[in-house]
Amino acid sequence: MVGMSMQPYGIQSMLKEGYRHLSGLDEAVIKNIEACKELSTITRTSLGPNGMNKMVINHLDKLFVTSDAGTIVNELEIQHPAAKLLVLAAKAQQEEIGDGANLVISFAGELLQNAEELIRMGLHPSEIISGYTKAINKTVEILEQLVESGSQTMDVRNKDEVISRMRAAVASKQFGQEEIICSLVADACIQVCPKNPTNFNVDNVRVAKLLGGGLHNSCIVRGMVMKSDAVGSIKRMEKAKVAVFAGGVDTNATETKGTVLIHSAEQLENYAKTEEAKVEELIKAVAESGAKVIVSGGSIGEMALHFCERYKIMVLKISSKFELRRFCRTAGAVAHLKLSRPSPDDLGYVDSISVEEIGGVTVTIARNEEGGNSISTVVLRGSTDSILDDLERAVDDGVNTYKAMCRDSRIVPGAAATEIELAQRLKEYANAEIGLDKYAITKYAESFEFVPKTLADNAGLNAMEIIAALYTGHGSGNAKLGIDLEEGACKDVSETKVWDLFATKLFALKYASDAACTVLRVDQIIMAKPAGGPRRDAAAAAGAGAEED
């Protein structure tokens, strides 16, 4: 009890009970750096084409098997505040470019590890930040000099040019299958590319994952693939006009409440007939407008369906409002709120709409070959759900890369050639500097070496030999010398055709440097006591325990 009655002193006396306060180099700065190093150690082994997969099971017991750093850090639910900064930087990269999240986290971790060595040597964090800031500015300058000449302009509808820029991004997720995936993605993107390529919308390339078969069975559909069956017996329509009703095809109750007094059976019969006549009148009006397909966003009544069959109208039900909007984009239709006669302008058009069975799954395919091909779907086939999920991530990376190249098509050498060239030129720049900044700039330059080292380690090659060979080649003026992972030797990237987008590299290095400097600027951590109530993970664990019982 004596300990309990002691009054808190220092900063603790100022804060509420339960607060934690960490300050100084050892408690705050080094601890933060260690947390970030741990995070980058997790993602680093997944870098590059030979990157290993991680098996992550989230709090809902969903299994992820992937080497995509964006997915890994999203599902890890990281608690440490400093490591969260790296996660935010990776998310920013994912949203901006859609690829390169791993480079952000791994590079930031490497910068912080080198910063820790400098701090132990006696440098102050602010001197390191100043050196790192100079280094990133110089890096951007050098990176612009490394851009491949002639890559400033490209035809975004030329499949070969698109694939050459996309291959590296897709190969890092699905090595060995990049040719098939790139070909599919390039076709899908070129189909939906608008007149002004900078307005390319990623949402217009959809992915439909169907179990069974293999990647070689995958194909592209100009239009939409929906995992649902048609309602009713009509399963196919060619060159049909489409009417879309968001509110459903059914007889609705009136908005005002009313009571109907019926005296005899005859009146009751007539009352039912009037309802029937009204539904028939509405369906007939839709049929007369020229529509052969009705798409409903809500329920479809039995009686309405009966009359649709009589007038040979195909009926589809799409319950998701987002899917409904996409369908409207595909067919060029305008959704009506309730069942009524649509005007000719509001009707959409599809070349064919049919129900097919792919690998035991019934799907409805709406094709629009000649018309405005505003949406295309990549139909992916694979043996398990986790393989399909990983293929989808590779496709997403490809589509995001296409969007990035529509804005900025410049490319730099890949396969660690750019990183070694940057490291070499930054070291020369550091030697010309005076003052303590030069140590930080040298360490920044050394941080780039982690890329060839990791690529070589993940491929089972001797990293030291590879890095030495790269430095020798770059020293003699060959700025495009990179690693050929298949042969385990250094080769010119213009032979191996490994190119990275300039924008991906630029943003990844910027975000990583910003995140590292932000972590280094922190010298005190003040943490409040967590709010009361059951914790989310504790509740999830309790729920999982109850299920097992």
Image (spheres, grey):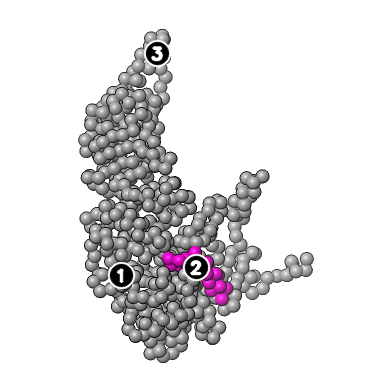
Amino acid type, mark 1: Ile
Residue 164 location, quadrant: bottom left
Q: Is residue 21 left or right of residue 478?
A: right
Q: Residue at x 39, y 27 (%)?
A: 301
**Residue behind mark 2:** 45
Q: Quadrant of the C terminus?
A: top right
**Which numbered disc flags the more N-terminal residue, 1 or 3?**
3
Q: Find the residue positioned furthest to the right.
A: 1
- For mark 3, give the secondary structure: helix
Amino acid type, mark 3: Leu
Depth order, front residue of 252/301: 301
**Residue behind mark 3:** 268
Q: Position of residue 544 (x, y in %)?
A: 61, 49
**Residue behind mark 1:** 411
Amino acid type, mark 2: Thr
Q: Residues within 10 Å of mark 3 (few under 14, many from 20)?
A: few
Instruction: Reply yes or no: does residue 38 show up in magenta.
Output: yes
**For discs 3 and 2, the disc positioned in front in the rendered view:** 2
**For discs 1 and 3, the disc positioned in front in the rendered view:** 1
